[in-house]
Amino acid sequence: MESWLARLKQKRNIMICFLYEFCGAAFVTYAYNLSYQERGQAMCNPLIRGFAYFIGWMIACSVSGAHFNPATSLAVFIYERSWSNLKTLIGYIFSQFLGAFAGIFVAYLLSRYYGAELYPNRYIINSSKNDLYFDEDGNIKYQRIIFQEIFQTFIFTLVFLIMKYRHTFANTDDIVKGIILAFTLYVVYTMDIKAGESLNPAFALAESCLMFARQHFIQDKELLGDVVWVYLLFPFLGSALASLLFILMDKHEKNLSKIMNGDD
């Protein structure tokens, strides 16, 4: 949406943006699913996820904007406040969901039922880390997972908007912006404390479907239906809050710039 190509408003160019978003979402989903933090533990490696996003960013940033995430696309739409981009937003989100499923499908073809798992593991409840997410009866503490989805999606989205729209970064090289965003993604995934956060509704739905398919090979199959809505809905809320805050920040910065320049 914010890319120069999408602004041309030509059907062929818009379709190219959709293709880039499809491929980028597929790649980051594939990278998440086949990355492991340590041997024998099906948790995503945050560093690999960050580098995967950086690769996608370098390929797509000047074309589609390198969102690869419906929540990020929503934040861009809210910030730009242009209803003429609504159809483009819908196309972006649809492409990202399709891309996430394509990435999961490729990961499945390569590794079958082995891959990173999205949800916390209730069967190691005696671990101090998992006591954060389950009570003594094994019931999940939704508030902790919901907060992480909102807050950490908020952090990444806010940094994304700053890199894209703040005029002080207008002349910053795309490589530097990509490194900053990749590092931010690495940080927010590292802070998950094994909560299994997604921060990306497209990935969350695709990964959940794969986990349902391999339910006989994982221990947490009865938990999936209870938690999937958290990973689908709350990244949108976090990104929306980030975009609203950035609108206020941007307005304040412009007013301050006028004062500093002596404008009325």
Image (cartoon, helix red, strand yellow):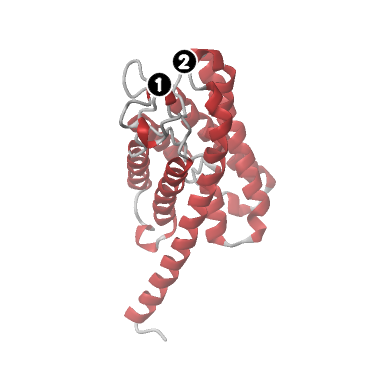
Q: Which image quarter: residue 255?
A: bottom left
Q: Residues within 10 Å of mark 2 (few under 14, many from 20)?
A: some
Does 216 sit above or below residue 128? Answer: above
The residue at 44%/28% (across/down) is 32
Residue 166 position, x and y percent, is: 40, 61
For marks 2 and 1, give the CA distance. 8 Å
The residue beneath circle 1 is 42
The residue at 36%/40% (across/down) is 182
The residue beneath circle 2 is 114
- Amino acid type assigned to the residue bearing label 2 in the image: Tyr
The residue at 48%/13% (across/down) is 111
Q: Which image quarter: residue 84?
A: bottom right
- Name the secondary structure under disc 2: loop
Residue 1 is left or right of residue 136, and the answer is right
For the C terminus, the quadrant is bottom left
Residue 39 position, x and y percent, is: 32, 16
Residue 150 position, x and y percent, is: 46, 48
The residue at 38%/47% (across/down) is 174
Q: Is residue 19 visible?
A: no
- Name the secondary structure under disc 1: loop
Question: Which one is in front, 258 or 7?
Answer: 258
